[in-house]
Image: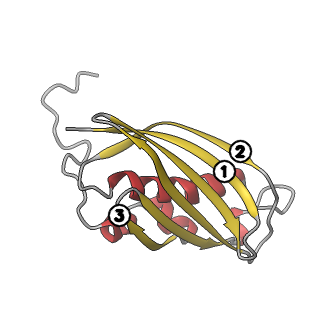
């Protein structure tokens, strides 16, 4: 498929208001992810683990934990008003959590250059226990 000249496939403009970015994120809506706060290079999101987000062992599915951390990562790396997208994310799952638990993901910038930035994202439960940790590398478009 030749896509030259097709300009409507992806949003070109960066988001300047991070609540709009989260509102337009369909995965965030599906999992009920909310934006708790953000600033330059950091963001915090939360969600309550729903029945639909459980795996076969009745624990929060890794995809749900990833989605929560990915939204925090997206907000943190886009918080400067420049379009940024993930290049890689490595996720480490540490503790299972069940239905009804509120989870938080906090993304913090570790390093930022002209074209890439590195983030550490920690997922914790409502008691502050570490559930998962991720490292994300973002590409910053000019």
For label 2, the crowd category at 10 Å Cα-Cα, with few meaning under 14, some 14 to 19 and many 20 or more, is few
Secondary structure found at label 3: loop
The numbered mark, 1 or 3, whose residue comes first in the sequence reads: 3
Using the image, determine if residue 141 lies above or below residue 59.
above
| In front: label 1 or label 3 | 1
Direction right: furthest residue: 57
Secondary structure found at label 1: strand
Residue toward you, 118 or 89:
118
For label 1, the crowd category at 10 Å Cα-Cα, with few meaning under 14, some 14 to 19 and many 20 or more, is many
Q: Position of residue 12 (x, y in %)?
A: 20, 46
**Quadrant where the C terminus is found in the figure:** top left
Q: Where is residue 9 in the image (x, y as percent from the top left)?
A: 25, 42
Q: Where is residue 18 in the image (x, y as percent from the top left)?
A: 33, 66
Where, by quadrant of the figure, is residue 4 drawn?
A: top left
Q: Mark 3 points at which residue?
A: 24
> Which residue is painted at 39% across and 65% down in the image?
22
CB-based contact (under 8 Å), mark 2 and mark 1: yes
> Which residue is painted at 72% across and 71% down in the image?
128
Q: How far apart are marks 1 and 3 (CA)?
A: 25 Å
In-image side of 67 versus 41 (left or right)? right
Q: Position of residue 93 (x, y in %)?
A: 75, 49
Q: Distance between the residues labelled 2 and 1?
A: 5 Å
Q: Mark 1 points at which residue?
A: 133
Using the image, determine if residue 14 lies above or below residue 44.
above
> Which residue is painted at 66% across and 50% down in the image?
133
CB-based contact (under 8 Å), mark 1 and mark 3: no
Direction left: furthest residue: 5
The numbered mark, 2 or 1, whose residue comes first in the sequence reads: 2
Secondary structure found at label 2: strand
The numbered mark, 3 or 2, whose residue comes first in the sequence reads: 3
Q: Name the residue under label 2.
A: 92
């Amino acid at each position: 498929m030749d896509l030259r000249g097709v300009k409507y496939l992806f949003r070109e403009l960066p988001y300047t208001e991070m609540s709009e970015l989260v509102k337009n994120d369909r995965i965030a809506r599906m999992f009920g992810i909310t934006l708790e706060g953000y600033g330059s290079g950091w963001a915090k999101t939360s969600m309550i683990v729903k029945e639909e987000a459980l795996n076969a062992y009745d624990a929060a599915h890794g995809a749900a934990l990833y989605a929560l951390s990915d939204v925090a990562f997206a907000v943190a790396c886009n918080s400067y008003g420049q379009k940024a997208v993930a290049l890689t994310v490595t996720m480490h799952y540490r503790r299972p959590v069940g239905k009804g638990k509120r989870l938080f993901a906090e993304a913090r910038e570790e390093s930022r250059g002209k074209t890439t930035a590195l983030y550490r994202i920690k997922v914790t439960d409502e008691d502050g226990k570490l559930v998962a940790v991720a490292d994300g590398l973002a590409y910053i478009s000019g």
